[in-house]
Image: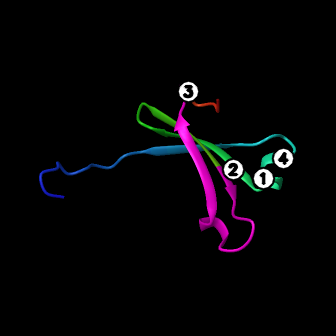
Amino acid sequence: LLGRPEAGPSVLTATYFDTSGQALRRRGLALRVRRDGDRRVQTLKAGGLGGAGLFDRMEWEGDVAGDEPD
């Protein structure tokens, strides 16, 4: 894009969390923390069990202080 420096490659790391009994997955939820440099973003996704599939999901996200969900 004009006037912007070219973006270089970046490394994203995503860690998904659930209970030992897979309680989130069984309810159609996915919880992850994604690391992008010094930034950590927690995301909770819901839905996607029917209809349009994975692309038909509600999603909430926000910054967190570390690599674990808040």
Q: Residues within 10 Å of mark 4 (few under 14, many from 20)?
A: few
Residue 10 image point, x, y percent = 37, 46
Residue linked to disc 3 = 66
Sort mark 1 into few (<14), some (14-19) or many (20+) by Cα contacts within 10 Å: some
Q: Quadrant of residue 15?
A: top right
Q: Earlier in the sequence, mark 3 or mark 1?
A: 1
- Tags 2 and 1 in contact by the CB under 8 Å rule? yes
Q: Quadrant of the C terminus?
A: top right
Circle 2: is it few (<14), some (14-19), or many (20+) Cα within 10 Å? some
What residue is shown at x 60% (from left), y 51% (from top)? Answer: 59
Determine contact: label 1, label 4, CB under 8 Å.
yes
Q: Secondary structure at mark 2?
A: strand
Q: Can you identify the residue that label 1 sits on? A: 25
Mark 2, residue position? 30
Decide which of tag 3 and tag 2 comes sooner along the chain.
2
Is 58 magenta? The answer is: yes
Q: Quadrant of the N terminus?
A: bottom left
